[in-house]
Image (spheres, rainbow, N blue to C red):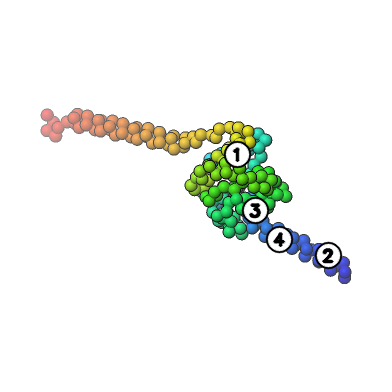
Amino acid sequence: MRRRLSAAAVLAALLAVAVAGVARADGDPASDVLIGSRVFYPYYSQTSKEGVKQLEATVDAAYAAGFPIRVAVITSPYDLGTVSALWHAPQAYCRFLSLEISFGYKGRLLVVTPNGYGYVDRTKPDAAKLRLIRRVPIGKGPDGLLASADRAVRTLAAAGGVRLPAPAQPTGSGSSTRDIVLIVLAGAGVALLSFLAHRLRRGRRRRPSPTGS
C-alpha cells in the first residue's frame, strides 16, 4: 500500500513540475526562443524575410567574430506574454528576460521595442552601452525594428572593437524586374497595335471599289 502511495506521490510531483514548466514557458515567448536561438521576432508579425535574414546574418557574424549576442525584437505588448506590464520599460524587460534564460545563456542581450532599447551583459545592466545604442533611431513597424536591431548590434560590436560585414543591399530585383517586363510588354503591345493599324489601312486602300472600276 505504501509503495502505491509513494508512486502516486512521485507521479503527482512530476506532473506538477511539468505543468509549472509549461506555464512558465507560455509566460514569456522570447525566453522560450532565445534559450536555443540567437534572434527572437514575432512569427505572426508581418516582417519581411529579407529583414529577418539580415538581422540573423549580422548576429551570426558577431558570434563568428567572438562577439556573441542575442536579440529580442518586440513589436507589441502581446509579445511579452504575461509580463506585458513591462511594455513601456524595455530595459526592465531585458533584465527580466536575461534572468529567464540565464540557465542556458548569460551573454549579451539586446531588446528592441517601439519604446526603446534594453541591454544587459551577463544579466547585468551596462549603462554606457545602453546610452550608446539609444542614439540609434527606432524604426517604424516590424521591418523598422528589425533594421534598428541590426544597426544596434553593429554599434555594440564596433564599440567592442569588432567590425562586422556590411549589410546586404536590398536587391529590389523583384520590383525592378517586374517593372522592366511591364515596360517591355507595353512597348510590344503598342508596336503590335501600330502594325495592325498600318496593315488595316493598306488593306482598305487595295480593296476594289463596288463598281468594279
Mark 4 residue type? Ala
Secondary structure under the numbered disc 2 in the rendered image: helix
Q: Earlier in the sequence, mark 3 or mark 4?
A: 4
Q: Which mark is residue 96?
A: 3
Mark 2 lies on residue:
7
Q: Position of residue 205 (x, y in %)?
A: 18, 30
Task: Identify the secondary structure beneath mark 3.
Answer: helix
Residue 4 at x, y = what percent?
A: 85, 68
Dot in front, 1 or 2: 1
- Is residue 197 or residue 56 the one in the foreground? 56
Q: Quadrant of the N terminus?
A: bottom right
Looking at numbered disc 2 in the image, what kind of residue is underneath it?
Answer: Ala
Q: State the residue lying farthest toward the bottom.
A: 1
Which residue is under mark 1? 156
Numbered badge on residue 20? 4
Mark 4 vs mark 1: which is more N-terminal? Answer: 4
Q: Say whether residue 109 is visible.
A: no
In space, the residues marked 3 and 2 are separated at their CA atoms by 37 Å
- Image quadrant where one finds the C terminus: top left
Tag nearer the camera, 4 or 1: 1
Distance between the alpha carbons at the discs numbered 3 and 4: 18 Å
Image position of 18 with respect to 156: above or below:
below
Q: Which mark is residue 131?
A: none
Q: Residue at x 17, y 31 (%)?
A: 208
- Which residue is located at x 52 percent, y 47 percent? 142
Towards the viewer: 16 or 176: 16
Tell me which corner region of the image, top left, top right, bottom left or bottom right, holds residue 110: top right
Indicate left or right for 102 with 179 as reference: right
Mark 3 residue crowding within 10 angstroms, few (<14) / some (14–19) / many (20+): some
Q: Residue furthest right?
A: 2
Q: Position of residue 141 (x, y in %)?
A: 49, 48
Tell me where residue 45 appears, x and y as whole percent.
53, 50
